[in-house]
Every structure is written in C-alpha cells, then in structure tokens.
Amino acid sequence: MDDVERMYRQLVRTIRASSPQLLTQSFPVSDLYSTILPYRLHRRELGVETNQDYEMAMLELLSGARGYLVVDDRMRDALGATLKSANPDPALIRDFSTARVALAPDALRQLDGESGGAPAATVASGGSPAAPPPRDAATVPVPAVTGSAPSARTSSQGSAAGAGAPPRASGTSASAAAIPARRPSRPVTIPDAGQECPHCKGALPAGRAITFCPHCGQDLTVQHCPACGSELEHGWKFCVTCGRAVAPA
C-alpha cells in the first residue's frame, strides 16, 4: 500500500466518522486539505514523514488518476500534466481550491467489499445517480462536481436528532471514530498593510488577529521545518524535532 492509497482509505474513514453525508456529496478541494484531512492531524495515520510527501500524495489523489475521486476535468488535466513533468508542483492544488470533488462510487464500493462495509451509492449508465437497495436510511445521490452544489457542511442527519445518540454511518469502525482533536488556535496579528499569505500570496487584512487565510483557508499560525517537515508554531526560531533554524513566518 503506497501513500496515495493510504490517504484515500484515511479519507473514507474520516468522512464516515465525522461527516457521513460527504460519502455521497461533493465538497471543495480546500476542505479536503485544510479541514477534512489536514497534514497536522493525520500524518501518523497517513504514514508520511514530511509535508512534501503529503502534498505529493494529495496531488495524485486530486488528479483522479487512481479513480478514487470524481474530479473536475480542468483540474484533472492540469494536475495530471504536472505529475508527468520532471518536477511536479504540488502548489498547483491551491489554484483549484474552490473546485469540487466527490468520492467515486466504484472505488468506495470496492473498499466496502474488502472491509464488509455498507454499499456505496451507484451512478446509472446514463449519468444519473441510482440509489442502492434501502438499508438503514435514505441515500443521497452523488452530485456532479461541476457548478453549484449543496454545502459540504450541511448535515444529513437532522432527521435522526430525536432518536437519542447521534447516528453513525454503517461500516464505521471504532478506530475510525477516534479523530484527533485540533490544537487550540492562536491567532496571528497582521501589523502592516500589504502582507501576503505564504500559501496563496493573497493580501491579508492589516491590523486584525486572524488564524486562517481569508483567500485559501490555510492555517497561518503554523509553519513547517524546511529540513524535516515538522509542524512548528508561528514565531518559533528553531525546529523542535531536528534543531534546524527556521526563518520567521
């Protein structure tokens, strides 16, 4: 099992445990790397040593090359081209932060078959979604990843609110439900006008204490060691893992 397959399996486990509606709904690319499966929270489960390894696996996953995700055609072509180049550029992912992706039903069905989980929603030959046989709850068809789509944040579990404990997606293991807690946010104050986000180069609002970039959604309170890729707090001068001096963020 390589980095890309581990990333896909961890993505499915995480969605089943925390946002089961995303099994059959599309969601923005930016949510995938900043909220659903961020490096800082999942690098142990992903088995990646550095942020660079994480970004390369994410680049291939989002290219649609493995058939794990249904992706936008324009993003597929652009990411596929950079993967074939001598020096693939993972930063290209940020250019498609607002593009929407969805779990591919065929890949999800195959994964369910291996683990004995619930069957995935299928797509009919004519392109329209076809729901699987009724199980515990109604299944929402997989939406197209182009154009407008329902927000990935909208919960599909509202109807079960009066049934006691929150519902859990079929096939979810106990280990998948143990999602690491995010560290407390420590906002960064932007003192001067013209300061840019180190990820997308967008202008940051001067004189405000912020945690995430308003343009790309990246966490501005952390940086990564250029030598070993360890996550560092904003303002640290040396890496706590390898001792490498770090330039101020």
Image (cartoon, grey):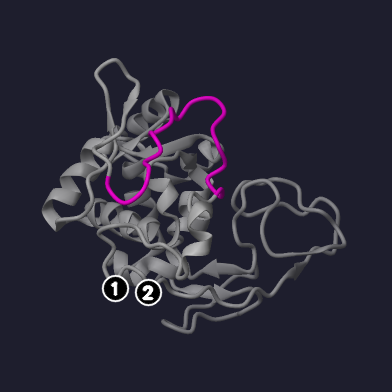
Question: Residue 47 vs residue 218: left or right?
Answer: left
Residue 62 in the image, given as x and y percentages of width and height: 37, 40
Question: Residue 60 vs residue 194: left or right?
Answer: left
Residue 149 in the image, given as x and y percentages of width and height: 54, 32
Residue at the front extreme?
162
* Secondary structure under the numbered disc 1 in the rendered image: loop
| Residue 67 visible in the snapshot | no
The answer to if 144 sits in the magenta stretch is yes
Say if 199 sits above or below 132 in the image: below
Real-space CA distance between mark 2 and mark 1, rounded to the nearest whole angstrom: 5 Å
Give the numbered dot on residue 178: 2
Give the numbered dot on residue 175: 1
Say if 27 sits above or below 33 in the image: above
Look at label 1 and name its amino acid.
Answer: Ser
Q: Residue at x 47, y 53 (%)?
A: 33
Residue 131 in the image, given as x and y percentages of width and height: 30, 33
Name the quadrant containing residue 11. Answer: bottom left
| Residue 167 visible in the snapshot | yes
Q: Which residues are magenta?
A: 135-154
How crowded pointer 1 is (Cα within 10 Å; few <14, some 14-19, many 20+) is rated as few
Look at label 2 and name its amino acid.
Answer: Ala
Say if 198 sits above or below 173 in the image: above
* Secondary structure under the numbered disc 2 in the rendered image: loop
Give the numbered dot on residue 69: none
Label 2 close to label 1 by CB (< 8 Å)? yes
